[in-house]
Image: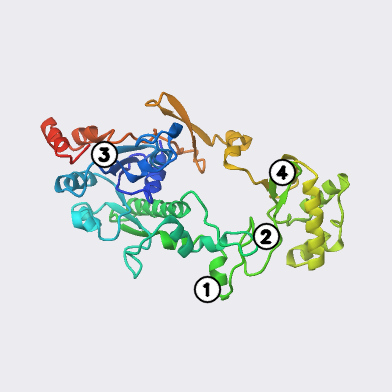
Amino acid sequence: MGALSGIRVVDLCDPKGQYMGRLLASHGADVVKIEPTGGDPGRRIGPFVDDRPHPDRSLFWWYYNAGKRSLAVDIFRPDGAELVRRLAASADVVLESFLPGALAEVGLDYDTLSAGHPALVMTSLTPFGQTGPWAHRAWSDGVGLALGGPMAMCGYDHVPDMPPIRPTENHAFHIGSHFGAMGTIIALIERTAGTTGAGQYIDASIHEACATTTEAGMPYALIEKQALLRQTGRHAAANPTEPWNYAASDGPEVNIFGMPRGDANFLKLVEWADDSGMVGNLRDPELMDGRKRQLGISQDTVRMMLADLEAFIASKPAQEIYRGGQDRGAAWGIVNAPDELLGDPHFHARGFWVDVEHEELGRTIIYPGAPAKLLGTPWAIQARAPLLGEHTQTILRDELALEPQALSALLGAGVIA
């Protein structure tokens, strides 16, 4: 039983908001994905399994819609919109990511849907929110990351004139969807804990969600009025900080995430380097004094320390540096390529990778699993993503009580698929 078992969700989102429904489905909610009769745009986004483009073979579609059911219906035709209104009348949540005002034109906005259903929670995820001067501006994931601030935080300090770097894999989509899903769950908790049992409308802005992820970047820019320096593998800041990425002897880079703050752990690192015959200047009195190490040491000492660390790391394989650092209380880790994560023993020990059955292909596919372990209400991929219109007739027949003749008429008219 998931934390959201028994919660019914109608998901009207396009690709930028579909992760909201996926997050809720993985916590046990019954999510009905409403998609156009010709298929959701996400079905046309590659890569495709075996490099064969097809609406039911998109890895993008699979990941963002696992655990959902598909109802293929044209919501811009009166009969189609009416079907969704009837479905929403028995739902706990409606999710959508249309441009502001678009759903009001077909009677699927919050005011209409909640008129006879005050317990409804509806979350609208849009680039810039429902109101304001940017509400209807054009947008893409790259625009979201640039205007929202994360792109100003990402880049390299060792490449002259390097432009900002856009994080890949729909980073802005993910940020916005996480905030939208959290807002939805909070509204459900309030509905249960409150005295009225009322739902609410959530106006979630991807732009504002992205802006909250810039950590110290926001106060530097708005309060200190200082420009940020993008720095390789570490936080952007107004001033340069010590480099954190160093190449091991076998090629991979190790991110050292600073030095241990505790004297005991720092001494363990020094002794490790000493045992390897590479202690260099690491026993400098300034470094051995924890108070000085945290409150500021001379730049000459910093440069010596980093040069010695770089030489030490370059003398050993990445796995030895990673494990040795961790054993000594240092937050050091290997910078892995995505495909290398499949073999990482920690992920396997955590049960992160999940086998999902795709009976339509006659094979099992490995998916990324739970971001966190919930012992009482476990996270789970309930099922593979639905085929196009896979559950249309079942939902309309069993849940909306449509007769066979009505189903045939809607199918023949192209209202459903």
Front: mark 2 or 3: 2
Badge 4 element:
loop
Crowd band around label 3 with a 10 angstrom C-alpha radius: few (<14), some (14–19), many (20+) = many
Measured as percent of width and height from the top left, residue 151 is found at 52, 61
Picture disc at residue 54 = none
**Farthest-out residue, right:** 277
Pointer 4 residue: 251
Task: Compare marks 1 and 4 and give the one earlier in the sequence.
Answer: 1
Measured as percent of width and height from the top left, residue 103 is found at 24, 55
Between 181 and 190, the residue placed more toward the observer is 181
Badge 1 element:
helix
Residue drawn at point x = 41 percent, y = 40 percent = 26
Q: CA distance from mark 1 to mark 3?
A: 46 Å
Front: mark 2 or 1: 2
Q: Quadrant of the N terminus?
A: top left
Between 250 and 312, the residue placed more toward the observer is 250
Between 97 and 348, the residue placed more toward the observer is 97
Task: Compare marks 4 and 3 and give the one earlier in the sequence.
Answer: 3
Instruction: Tell me the amino acid under the disc marked 2.
Output: His
Pointer 2 residue: 158
Front: mark 4 or 3: 4
Residue drawn at point x = 35 percent, y = 64 percent = 137
Q: Quadrant of the C terminus?
A: top left
Measured as percent of width and height from the top left, residue 298 is found at 80, 68
Picture disc at residue 71 = 3
Instruction: Tell me the amino acid under the disc marked 4.
Output: Gly
Res 379 quadrant in image: top left
Instruction: Tell me the amino acid under the disc marked 3.
Output: Leu
